[in-house]
Image (cartoon, rainbow, N blue to C red):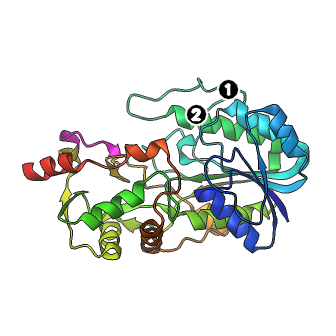
Amino acid sequence: MRILVMGGTWFLGRAIVEQALEKGWDVTTFNRGRSGPDVTGVQAVHGDRTVQDDLQKLAQHGPWDTVIDTSSSELPPRDVRLATTTLAKRARRWVHVSTVSVYEGWPHEPLTEESVLLRCPADADGSFGYTGESGSPTKYGFQKAGGEQAVAETFGDEAVFLRPGVILGPGEYVGRLPWWLERAKRGGRILAPAPAEQQIQPVDVRDVAAFAVRQAASTGPGRFNVTHPDGISFGDFLAACLRVTGSDGTPVWVEASTLIEHGVKQWTELPLWRTHAGVWAVDSQGAVDTGLQCRPIADTVRDTWAWWAADGRPVDHPRWAEHGITAEKEARILASL
């Protein structure tokens, strides 16, 4: 099996590469060489996927059975289409890592793979789309929907779309779980979003990688929500963070209305907290039926702490600074209760 991974040096891309190599596959990676070291054992090709000449040089290293694209997150649809059309004759199949943000109803409504998608043309540039007054839909969602359209138009029945919600695990570069781990380690009274029994559905990066690799070796079309089918309560999640860090911290569960009154930013200042009804109501049964297997989220917390304590974050990323409430703001809110 010969695959091409667009990206392949950090987090999900790296996990995919490592698992493919363990299977004995022939792996080519394509990236700019800026985000992390190449995995030993790959054929590394460096270049810019938005540059036609670089893609044409990449094509000479094919053919491949499958392309797995993990690096289109910040690209407009027309740049996704540039890659798919340039590589169309050098690959049989394209597995595209997308997002639940492509759904029209995200994050307000429960979702299945049959939920309506946002509309965006495959040749759209980065200006297409908008973010609604309520924070939904998002321009990002429109852009990612257009990227899916670009893949579908080129690869047809051999196009596969993976739509994760939140991915956590060793190597995380956004900072959601590391922030909670550090906050747990610091101890004391910990501001926590009530209710403690709220279920959340983050999925482990290694499980997403395994599912992507499985889809790479398959045939036929696919569109899959990739979220944890069992989930974990926020209370159990925070308890796991306290346990692995050896902390004696005490969660103080505060109702959403109070947090909002104090100006706590959802999704970022208290990572993973968001009040919209559909955020953690994403049905992934289709993926489970096709082979998605998810380890307990408590295991993800444990393994991420082991990685974090040993190595820290692997690369600088602008989203890192968005996450986590300041100690001063947290203290003010707790003092006011």
Q: Which mark is residue 156?
A: none
User: Which of the two discs, 1 and 2, labels the residue nearer the N terminus?
Assistant: 1
- Position of the N terminus by quadrant: bottom right
Residue occupying the point 59% across, 71% down? 293
Camera-side residue: 97 or 284?
Answer: 97
The reply to whether callout 1 and callout 2 are in contact (CB within 8 Å) is yes
Q: Position of residue 34 (x, y in %)?
A: 63, 46
Direction from residue 180 to residue 303 in the image, left or right: right
Looking at the image, can residue 204 be seen? Answer: yes
Direction from residue 137 to residue 25 in the image, left or right: right
Provide the residue designation for mark 1: 124
- Crowding at mark 2 (Cα within 10 Å: few <14, some 14-19, many 20+): many
- Kind of residue sitting beneath label 2: Phe
Q: Quadrant of residue 140?
A: top right
* Distance from Cα at disc 1 to Cα at disc 2: 10 Å
Looking at the image, can residue 106 be seen? Answer: no
- Kind of residue sitting beneath label 1: Ala
Provide the residue designation for mark 2: 142
Specify whether residue 151 is painted magenta: no
Direction from residue 136 to residue 155 in the image, left or right: right
Camera-side residue: 56 or 33?
Answer: 33
Provide the secondary structure element on which disc 2 rests: helix
- Crowding at mark 1 (Cα within 10 Å: few <14, some 14-19, many 20+): many
Residue occupying the point 38% across, 54% down? 272
For this orientation, the residue located farthest to the left is 336
Q: Position of residue 245 (x, y in %)?
A: 32, 72
Residue occupying the point 82% across, 39% down? 55
Q: Which residues are magenta?
A: 260-267
Residue occupying the point 50% across, 45% down? 317
Provide the secondary structure element on which disc 1 rests: loop
